[in-house]
Amino acid sequence: MTEGFASPLFAICAVLSFIVMYDAAGVRRSAGEQAQMLNEIIAQLSEQNQLQNEQMVREIFGHTPLQVVVGAGIGILIPIVTHLIFKI
């Protein structure tokens, strides 16, 4: 912790972390919800024998907002605890 909160390095890391958290909770979660809807459509079409080659789409994408907040908290706590233990 030699740079501090006012350093350009902290600003870059903070911006990149917010981009990653937004992607994990927003964009990827939305893609997962769309994949779930596509799988429902595929299942309905295959039941009606209108689809010959049925291949389901992977539905598990992204994280819930709670998972993102907990991950951010862990990401903040680990460096603080490490600094306190080792006095780096």
Image (tube, grey):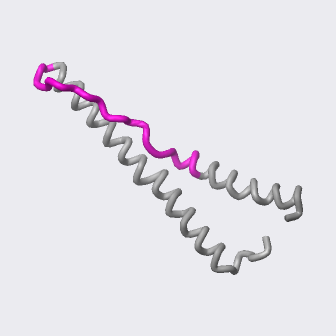
Magenta stretch: includes residue 59: yes
Is residue 38 positioned above or below 18 on the image?
above
Residue at 57% x, 47% y is 66
Q: Position of residue 43 (x, y in %)?
A: 24, 25
Work out whether residue 48 or residue 20 is closer to the camera in this orientation and state it.
20
Number of marks in picture: 0
Is residue 45 positioned above or below 14 on the image?
above
Q: Is residue 83 left or right of residue 38?
A: right
Is residue 6 positioned above or below 88 on the image?
below
Q: Position of residue 53 (x, y in %)?
A: 18, 26
Q: Is residue 64 left or right of residue 73?
A: left
Magenta stretch: includes residue 61: yes
Magenta highlight range: 48-68
Work out whether residue 20 or residue 73 is closer to the camera in this orientation and state it.
20
Work out whether residue 77 or residue 8 is closer to the camera in this orientation and state it.
8
- The quadrant in which residue 11 appears is bottom right
Q: Is residue 31 left or right of residue 6?
A: left
Is residue 86 positioned above or below 12 on the image?
above
Residue at 36% x, 41% y is 33
Residue at 29% x, 36% y is 37
Q: Position of residue 61 (x, y in %)?
A: 43, 42
Q: Position of residue 79 (x, y in %)?
A: 76, 58
Q: Main secondary structure of the magenta part?
A: loop
Q: Is residue 63 left or right of residue 30?
A: right
Residue at 79% x, 75% y is 2
Q: Quadrant of the N terminus?
A: bottom right
Q: Quadrant of the C terminus?
A: bottom right
